[in-house]
Image (tube, grey):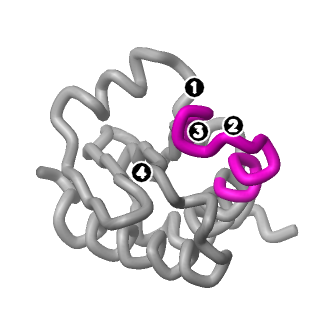
Amino acid sequence: MNAPYQFTRQLRLLKASEYKYVFDQPCKSSDRYLTVLARANARTFARLGLAIAKKRVKLAVARNRIKRLTRESFRHHQSSLAGLDCVVLAKNGIDQVNNHTLLHSLARHWQYLSRRCKKS
């Protein structure tokens, strides 16, 4: 597998303090299905955190599908997001969306955040 496109542990937000850093002063992108928060970090690579709440998406199968698609989309767009910490939040109704629509929504969020949030 091509190393630059792997989703390794260092590309994830793991600690509560890392999530808090993003939540404190986020650059925000939102649509009908998702809210994506981002904040510039001191690293040369992007990191991803997922907050797909059981309250928003009841079935574990649906939550896992959303997380899998989000990680895959992030993996493909990580080069344009270098230097950002991103947190993805699900909204009600996202479990009814098909994969194509969800991936398209995520691509728009990544594009918007890469333009607007770098070094802000």
Could you tell me how far apart the alpha carbons at marks 2 and 4 are, in whole angstroms? 15 Å
In what quadrant of the picture does the N terminus appear? bottom right
Q: Which residues are magenta?
A: 52-66
Viewer-nearest residue: 73 or 51 = 51
Question: What label does residue 14 carry, if any?
Answer: 1
* Mark 4 in CB contact with mark 1 (< 8 angstroms): no
Q: Nearer the viewer, mark 1 or mark 2?
A: 1
Mark 3 — residue?
A: 12
Q: Nearer the viewer, mark 2 or mark 4?
A: 2
Q: How many marks can you see?
A: 4
Crowding near the residue tagged with mark 2, few <14, some 14–19, many ≥20 C-alpha atoms within 10 Å: few
Label 2 sits on a secondary structure element that is: helix
Mark 4 — residue?
A: 44
* Mark 3 in CB contact with mark 1 (< 8 angstroms): yes
Label 3 sits on a secondary structure element that is: loop
Whether residue 79 sits left or right of residue 43 in the image: it is: right
State whether residue 99 is above or below residue 35. below
When asked about the image quadrant of residue 21, the answer is: top left
Q: Please say whether residue 106 is visible from this viewpoint.
A: yes
Crowding near the residue tagged with mark 1, few <14, some 14–19, many ≥20 C-alpha atoms within 10 Å: some
Q: Amino acid at mark 3?
A: Arg
Q: Amino acid at mark 4?
A: Thr
When asked about the image quadrant of residue 9, the answer is: top right
* Mark 3 in CB contact with mark 2 (< 8 angstroms): yes
Instruction: Give the x, y percent position of residue 55.
Output: 55, 33
Question: What label does residue 80 carry, if any?
Answer: none
Crowding near the residue tagged with mark 3, few <14, some 14–19, many ≥20 C-alpha atoms within 10 Å: some
Q: Residue at x 27, y 44 (%)?
A: 39
Could you tell me how far apart the alpha carbons at marks 3 and 2 are, in whole angstroms? 6 Å
